[in-house]
Amino acid sequence: MTPAAQASRPTVLFVCKSNRGKSQMAEALLRHLAGDAVEVFSAGTQPAFGKGPNDESVAALAEIGADMSGGTAAAVDDDVLRRADRVVVLGTAAQLEPVPGMRAPIEVWETDEPSERGIDGAARMALIRDDIATRVRDLWVALSAAPGDPAQ
């Protein structure tokens, strides 16, 4: 990737509470769709330091060819918050406050929670994955649209 292309690519930060499931899923899904055309991060407001991603999340993504197996829980970085073009909190468990110098508003995706309907295990995670994947696809369409294009 040329330096000019790298400088113009959008930056996205996905946040959830522990950074072991939803936010890492979203990061992996966007990376799977966009490759190097976007700079993408995930973080947790209360990260489970030293732990990798949730095994059920990893398996659900593997089913569709995306990989999050190498991720580790990370805390929200104020510098990434400031330079992100999109900041997305997944679910309502994580609470994220803006920091001075941010250029993007904080979006909240109220994601599906199948356990509230008695759905657990792999079936639960597949529904969560599909909900997040739809939202990530829509985000990628908006990010990759030409300036002034109605998709933005």
Image (cartoon, helix red, strand yellow):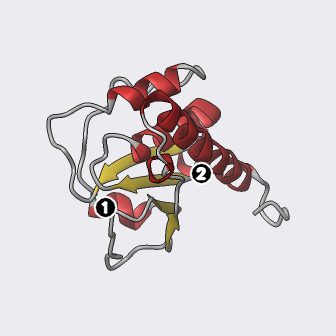
Residue lying at 52% horizontally and 56% vertically, measured from the top left:
111
Residue 13 in percent (x, y) is at 44, 54
Give the quarter of the figure containing the N terminus. top right
Residue 113 in percent (x, y) is at 48, 52
Q: Which residue is mark 1?
A: 79
Displayed quadrant of residue 151: bottom right
Label 2 crowding class (10 Å Cα cut-off): few <14, some 14-19, many 20+? few
Label 1 crowding class (10 Å Cα cut-off): few <14, some 14-19, many 20+? few
> Is 86 on the left or on the right of 15, as rendered?
right
Farthest residue to the right: give it.
Answer: 150
Dot label at residue 151: none
Q: Which mark's residue is nearer the viewer, 2 or 1?
A: 1
Answer above or below: position of 128 versus 116.
above
Displayed quadrant of residue 126: top right
Residue lying at 79% horizontally and 55% vertically, measured from the top left:
146
Residue 3 seen in this snapshot: no
Answer above or below: position of 130 versus 79.
above
Q: Which residue is mark 2?
A: 8
Foreground: 57 or 13?
A: 57
Asked which secondary structure carries label 1, the reply is helix
Displayed quadrant of residue 99: bottom left
Give the quarter of the figure containing the C terminus. bottom right
Residue lying at 54% horizontally and 38% vertically, measured from the top left:
129
Residue 12 in percent (x, y) is at 49, 53
Q: Amino acid at mark 2?
A: Ser
Foreground: 114 or 87?
A: 114
Q: Amino acid at mark 1?
A: Asp
